[in-house]
Amino acid sequence: MRAVQVTRHGDPIDVLAVNDVEVPEPEPGEVLIRVRAAALNFNDIDRCLGKLVSVTKDPPFTLGMDVCGVVEAAGAGTEDWVGQRVVAISKDALGGIAEYTVAPAAGVFRAPEPLADVEAAAFLLPFHTTHLALFHRAQLTAGETLLVHSGASGLGTAAIQLGVAAGARVFTTVSSPAKAELCRSLGAELVIDHTADDFVEAVLGATGDAGADVVCDLAGGGFVAPSWQCIARDGRYLPVGFTDDDENGMTGRPLRMASIGNFSIVGVLGAWVDDLDPGMRRFGFNPFTRADGDRVHEALLRLVDEGTIRPHVGRTVTMDEAGAALDDHEHRRSIGRTVVEVAASA
Ligand SMILES: NC(=O)c1ccc[n+]([C@@H]2O[C@H](COP(=O)([O-])OP(=O)(O)OC[C@H]3O[C@@H](n4cnc5c(N)ncnc54)[C@H](OP(=O)(O)O)[C@@H]3O)[C@@H](O)[C@H]2O)c1
């Protein structure tokens, strides 16, 4: 089968290649998915570069996390999924941009019916993660103010839509007029170009100095400390992403700011694990369970069915174009989700 592989560590544009590899075999508890479409994630860049990620592998390995496809075969215990159109996170968050991928059933969900394959591939991580972040972790409610950094990113476009759907006032930061326009079209009330304007002043100005009740930070790095200057008392800061951070997210952060600002730091991990490895638990992982994932998924399916939310796919590409597309993500030229049309590339 054809697969987009990291051939050696380096920039995506230099190291990705479409190779012929063996179709993977599902182990017990896993399914084999015939992939129709697979989304690109910012984190794929780190995997190409060989930086710290949850599961490290030596090249060559196949890239790709969230996919939409049809379950073609089952490992022991997952037979019920065979034949179903699903969205899923591939095993070890790798291997998705390929004609076939294996996924643990804990990360496999029914594909939202109203969404085409390409849109469905852009659905799972953005909407599950931000739903979990905004409503379970940060308890965002109607009338509150939500600030989303990187509003035009894959996750950002989902967070804006979920915030608007919940009746929150949604503010967001972006770096270009085109991204600003997209965020406005998704319902953001205040869109701040962080390359031109001070978002601290903009947020405080729009809230009478109260600040944002919830900050969904998809950037980290230089966005962290200023966010803590314009967050509300009892506000909730969500360190969801670290696109702007050269190092590991929280390392060396001025955590004392959380104390003097009287707000909570609420982490979130978009993963569903029922049998957590004790070593991983002791490292500090404490993910939600599959039952939690099912609850979120049902809530999201209702929102999709009623037309309240829809993934934003900025661009579709072929497998051969994945490296150049990731380069666009790395250099801020992407808008929304970029999706690889695997079936069409074969
Ligand atoms: N916690 C979890 O479970 C979880 C799950 C999935 C993803 N994430 C994280 O969520 C974040 C968003 O992921 P995504 O795949 O949606 O991202 P993406 O679509 O590739 O977003 C890229 C955007 O990030 C922004 N950005 C901020 N600082 C940047 C920098 N220094 N260099 C390049 N871009 C920068 C840019 O927006 P502007 O130019 O408009 O600033 C850029 O357009 C990532 O950090 C990812 O790791 C976390």
Image (tube, rainbow, N blue to C red):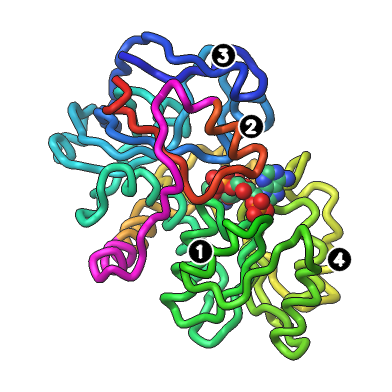
Residue 344, quarter of picture:
top left
| Percent x, y of residue 42 | 58, 40
Numbered label attached to residue 59: 3
Report which residue position mark 1 lands on. 159
Amino acid type at mark 1:
Ala
Residue type at the position of mark 3: Pro
For label 4, the residue is 256
Which secondary structure lies at badge 3?
A: loop
User: Mark 2 or 3 closer to N-term?
Assistant: 2
Is 234 covered by the magenta stretch? no
Q: Are marks 4 and 3 in contact (CB under 8 Å)?
A: no
Lower position in the chain sequence, tag 2 or tag 1: 2
Query: Residue 305 colored magenta?
Result: yes
**Residue for point 62% across, 57% down:** 150
Instruction: Tell which tag, 1 or 4, sits nearer the viewer.
Output: 1
Looking at the image, which residue is at 28% across and 48% down?
A: 109
